[in-house]
Image (cartoon, rainbow, N blue to C red):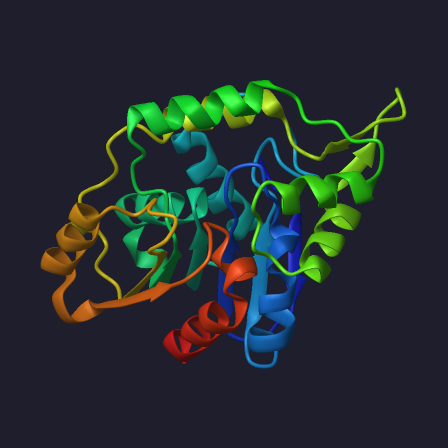
Amino acid sequence: MELNLHEWGDSEAPVVVCLHGVNAHGRRFRKLAEERLADRFRVLAPDLRGHGNSGWEPPWTIATHTHDVLETLDAAGVHRAQWVGHSFGGRLILELAALAPERIDRAALLDPAIQLLPHVSYDFAELERAELTFESPEEAIRARLDGGSLAPREFLEEEMAEHLVRSADGRFRFRYCQAAVVSLYGELCTPPPAPETLRAPTLLLHSGEFGLVREEQIEAYRAALGNLLELAEVGGGHIVYWDAFTETAGAVDRFLN
């Protein structure tokens, strides 16, 4: 499937591809692109299958998502790039490194979902089955803040303007397919490619507070990549480019340079 693509910067500049996480969308990278990257890179951020303005039909497997990304980049004339992936997007970069390593110059993994523990995936999937609807965008913002989100309110306001749609019943829902998201939480329990397959300079940035990236995973990548690996820990929650934007954007900016 050719995916809906968000783009910033000069079309002739070196390419950075940004891959979002489960239940997100490509335009979440707007602030990172416009404020830190677009002055010297062509930044491309697809809406993955089942998300945003891309097609929602199955299959929703990791393999399908990986091939969707390659097909989309081929259509855009991009055959090699630097990569930024958040959460599930980080896992997709690991899959791409195993499938088509020649397409990866550098990889920035932002709190990547390398492999979720089964009980963690189950809990996330069960939460997703309880459909979230809102009377207004303001109610959606309050729900995020009441749920402990550390993101600045301005980030949440932009998110709701971009990602919420009014349904026929008058309620607001996020622009993604719940079935696709539930399916992906199961996929994220499957074993990832071995760390050794990632043979490019790599930034592994993680939220120590959230704890999605486990210590044994960090050690495995440190042992496999050696001097190719740069580690960074930031505060806040899982959405590191919201909760710790300055630190995350600075680390990505330095790494891609």
Q: Would residue 204 appear left or right of 3 to someone viewing this image?
A: left
Q: Position of residue 252 (x, y in %)?
A: 43, 71
Q: Position of residue 32 (x, y in %)?
A: 58, 68
Instruction: Answer with the quarter of the image where residue 51 lies.
Output: top right
Q: Position of residue 87 (x, y in %)?
A: 43, 46
Q: Residue at x 61, y 42 (%)?
A: 3
Quadrant placement of the C terminus: bottom left
Instruction: Answer with the quarter of the image where residue 194 lies.
Output: top left
Residue 153 visible? The answer is yes
Check the image and report above or below for 206 versus 9: above
Q: Would residue 78 appear left or right of 98 to someone viewing this image?
A: right
Quadrant placement of the N terminus: top right
Instruction: Answer with the quarter of the image where residue 138 lies.
Output: top right
Residue at the left extreme of this rendering: 223
Q: Position of residue 172 (x, y in %)?
A: 80, 32
Between residue 226 and residue 207, name the one nearer to us: 207
Q: Residue at x 58, y 59 (%)?
A: 44
Residue 9 visible? The answer is no
Check the image and report above or below for 65 versus 76: above
Between residue 192 and residue 212, name the one nearer to us: 212
Q: Residue at x 29, y 53 (%)?
A: 101
Q: Residue at x 40, y 32 (%)?
A: 62
Q: Would residue 139 appear left or right of 190 to someone viewing this image?
A: right
Count of marks overlaid on the render: 0
Check the image and report above or below for 212 versus 108: above
